[in-house]
Image (tube, helix red, strand yellow):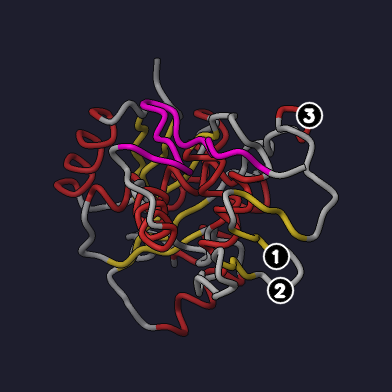
Amino acid sequence: MAKATVLSVDDDLDLQTTVSHYLEEDGYTVVSAYSGAEAVEKVKSAAPDLVLLDLGLPDEEGFRVLTRIKAQSSVPVIIVSGKSDTTEKIVGLEMGADDYITKPFELRELSARIKAVIRRGEPAMPAATLAAAPAKDKIKFEGWTLDRLQYQLFDPKGKSAELTAGEFRLLEALVLSPNRALTRDYLFELTREDEFESFDRAIDIQIGRLRKKLGDDPKDPAYIKTVRGVGYMFCAAVAE
């Protein structure tokens, strides 16, 4: 079953073929358009879940196409452009684009950005699906103290573990739902620090850093257990 339908708008036939093949292999349905007029028509007829929009189209300026698309649909749009000028990126985002990627790009990164943008438009995980969060400002486990007011984690000797904001939010999410597997997608949305960060292994990398600061052995974890095919689970006892 396809993940989503992507409308790819670009007049470069070779690039269209390459992108379409890669995304279809990754599970997406891909619809192609080669002009601004065709893009606007296919937003109506194909009802895509996301649009990849090149700015250098043969019939009209790409920002105008973006405006026309946004006037008729709430579909998310990722601008794909050969221009890396910061001002152009800002203009595109202010005009309603959901992300901006510069050519040439890695196909793996493009797929990850598509995934992240689509995921941002999905309903958030209902609070009822998670364990009720403790009302405490300080949460203790195995001698460690997670201070939610100071945004700090203190070791058994009272020394700060010097967590980044993202690492703190990641640990907090896990600690607030002990013995419950949380998906990578959920943790990614909850903890990312950069609006445009979108790499699939971002959470895995953060977990690795967090484990190192906790002195947690990933092969025999005392705190954060990997749940294969799902994500991660906090497995230490949390003090009541």
Q: Is residue 223 left or right of residue 8?
A: right
Tag 1–tag 2 contact (CB < 8 Å): yes
- Nearest the viewer among 58 and 152 is 152
Which part of the image, by quadrant, shows the C terminus?
top right
Instruction: Residue at 34% x, 48% y: name it.
Output: 201
Question: From the viewer's perspective, is residue 33 above or below residue 91?
Answer: above
Give the position of the N terminus as an image quadrant. Answer: top left
Q: Residues within 10 Å of mark 1 (few under 14, many from 20)?
A: some
Q: Is residue 64 visible?
A: no
Instruction: Determine whether the residue tagged by mark 3 lies in a helix, strand or loop.
Output: helix
Which residue is disc 2 drawn over?
150
Q: Position of residue 50 (x, y in %)?
A: 49, 42
Nearest to the observer: residue 81 or residue 187:
187
- Residue topped by disc 1: 147
Q: Residue at x 36, y 42 (%)?
A: 33
The reply to whether the C-beta atoms of the residues labelled 2 and 3 are less than 8 Å apart is no
Left or right placement of residue 141 versus residue 147 in this view: left
Residue depth check, mark 3 versus mark 1: number of the one nearer the observer: 1
Q: Say which mark, if any, is on residue 219.
A: none
Q: Position of residue 27 (x, y in %)?
A: 32, 26
